[in-house]
């Protein structure tokens, strides 16, 4: 859609892969290595993006981790790790970017949450908790900042065909994976949410696999 993409990842290898994919599609971007769970790293990332590009019109928070395990088998370390990436990372980026959006007269934040932030699933208790928190943050920020022309939306996919979806009886190519959305489907939903509108704003998009009831 013509946007300059700022890619953020923890490793240079991930950034190189993203840069190649972006280049193959005819896009251009700025790749920044950062840890979304560290306030100083997030602040430095946002500062560099502003310094080199001048503004941030759209922020997409899509870092996420999880897993499948009975509730009593999760450790405190698991809880801290999942909440730090899924919830704290989203909060840190919103906290750093919103002041810039205020100064420039507006912007749009899109948080990639999950249907697990709308209803609970067995063996995913901590992941669900992190995504419920992310959806709640999205709704609160939208209500707090919409009058300043800062829109905040959540995209809530169901099952998506990625390595993240493997587990809990699902394997690559298994019947339980059939009908899942693709990463490209989710990207299209993010673009749909981000498209400028004069008379309305999208607050939430919910995506369901074709083989799953609502």
Image (spheres, rainbow, N blue to C red):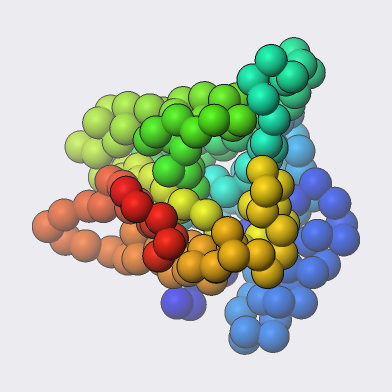
Q: In this view, does 191 lie above or below 109?
A: below
- Please state the horizontal and vertical placement of residue 207, each as a whole percent of the image: 38, 56
Q: Is residue 17 above or below residue 119?
A: below
Question: 136 or 20: nearer the eye?
Answer: 136
User: Can see residue 138?
Assistant: no
- Please state the horizontal and vertical placement of residue 164, each as a whole percent of the image: 68, 51
Quadrant placement of the N terminus:
bottom left
Q: In this view, does 200 lie above or below 184?
A: above
Q: Residue visible at 40% across and 65% down?
A: 210
Question: 41 or 200: nearer the eye?
Answer: 200
- Please state the horizontal and vertical placement of residue 38, each as a whole percent of the image: 73, 28
Q: In this view, does 5 lie above or below 134?
A: below
Residue found at the very far left of the displayed protein: 199
Q: Residue visible at 76% across and 38% down?
A: 35
Number of numbered discs on residues: 0
Is residue 212 found left or right of 77 in the rendered image?
left
User: Can see residue 147?
Assistant: yes
Picture quadrant of residue 18:
bottom right
- Please state the horizontal and vertical placement of residue 151, each as a whole percent of the image: 31, 45
Q: Residue visible at 25% across and 31% down?
A: 143
Q: Residue visible at 55% across and 67% down?
A: 178
């Amino acid at each position: 859609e013509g946007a300059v993409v700022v890619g953020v990842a923890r490793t240079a290898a991930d950034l190189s892969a993203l840069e190649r994919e972006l280049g193959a599609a005819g896009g251009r971007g700025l790749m920044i290595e950062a840890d979304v769970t560290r306030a100083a790293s997030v602040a430095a990332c946002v500062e560099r993006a502003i310094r080199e590009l001048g503004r941030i019109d759209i922020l997409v928070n899509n870092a996420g981790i999880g897993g499948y395990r009975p509730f009593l088998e999760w450790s405190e370390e698991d809880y801290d790790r999942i909440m730090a990436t899924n919830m704290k990372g989203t909060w840190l980026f919103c906290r750093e970017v919103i002041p810039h959006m205020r100064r420039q007269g507006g912007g749009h934040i899109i948080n990639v949450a999950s249907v697990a932030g709308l209803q609970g699933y067995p063996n995913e208790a901590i992941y669900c908790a992190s995504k419920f928190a992310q959806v709640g943050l999205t709704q609160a920020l939208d209500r707090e900042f919409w009058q300043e022309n800062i829109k905040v939306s959540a995209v809530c996919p169901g099952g998506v065909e990625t390595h993240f979806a493997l587990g809990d009886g699902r394997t690559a190519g298994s019947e339980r994976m059939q009908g899942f959305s693709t990463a490209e489907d989710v990207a299209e939903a993010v673009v749909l949410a981000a498209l400028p509108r004069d008379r309305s704003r999208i607050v939430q998009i919910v995506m369901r696999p074709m083989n799953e009831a609502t």
